[in-house]
Amino acid sequence: MSKNKLRKFEDMNTYSHVFQYPFAVLQEKGFELKGKWNESFFGNSRPVVIELGCGKGEYTVGLAKLFPEKNFIGIDIKGARIWSGATQAQRENLKNVAFIRTHIELIDCFFASGEVSEIWLTFPDPQMRKVNKRMTSARFMELYSRILKENGEIHLKTDSNFMFTYTGEMVKANHFPVSIRTDNLYESHLADEILSIRTFYEQQWLDRGISIKYIRFALAARETYAEPEAEIEHDAYRSFRRNAK
């Protein structure tokens, strides 16, 4: 591991707003703030909004600055990425921001039923060959339903036409109410101050001439969540992590 990464991990160990919990610790002791984020950490009763796969934390921090009346928590397994947003929040003394370093599949270890009001998914890997790892799959809808309040909203921003189309089909199959849907956000005149927050990775897609897609829907409670049956064409390009054009 590089000295730079080691320094970042050391920094985060001193940040009171960053939580790093190995799975073994969660199994043995659980997470003490589960169900108590408002009273024991934020010290208020404001809505809790989470960003899954937050990367460098641009959206988490950006939303926190726009909406001081809400609390924001960024979640990612990559600690060196989280460091950027966590450090900015520390420097700017943002009291409505926290970060968790963990696998997204473990989020119900950190939040109680109904504790989260909104979920942001910003440029997740479309996982075109692995449905169970796709962050808008039926499997993840069931996971989100354990922590999201009834009819809480889910936001997806993506460069991937596959991910966007798949999510639209999943929403249709489960009859979720959709409030906004566009396959070209910055040409749609829908990009308000919230949607215009651009992450490091988003700007890379835009620089490649790839349009940004956005969908916002409410997660209605279901006994089971259905997978769409439609065949969806795979993206013709590859991500930056997999030999980008």
Image (spheres, grey):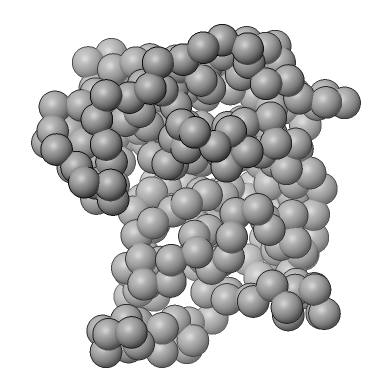
- Give residue 15's position: percent from left, percent from top: 48, 82
Residue 115 at least partly seen: yes
Q: Is residue 94 above or below residue 105?
A: below
Q: Quadrant of residue 149?
A: top right
Does residue 65 lie above or below 158 as drawn? below
Q: Residue at x 44, y 53 (%)?
A: 54
Q: Quadrant of residue 132?
A: top right
**Residue 81: x percent and y percent?**
36, 66
Left or right, 176 with respect to 52, comes to right
Q: Residue furthest right?
A: 223
Image coords of residue 14 (percent x, y): 47, 88
Quadrant placement of the C terminus: top left
**Residue in view at x 76 percent, y 25 percent:** 225
Determine the residue positioned at 75% across, 61% down: 109
Residue at the image point whose x is 37% and y is 36% from the top? 194
Most distant residue in the front direction: 129
Q: Nearer the viewer, residue 111 or 25?
A: 25
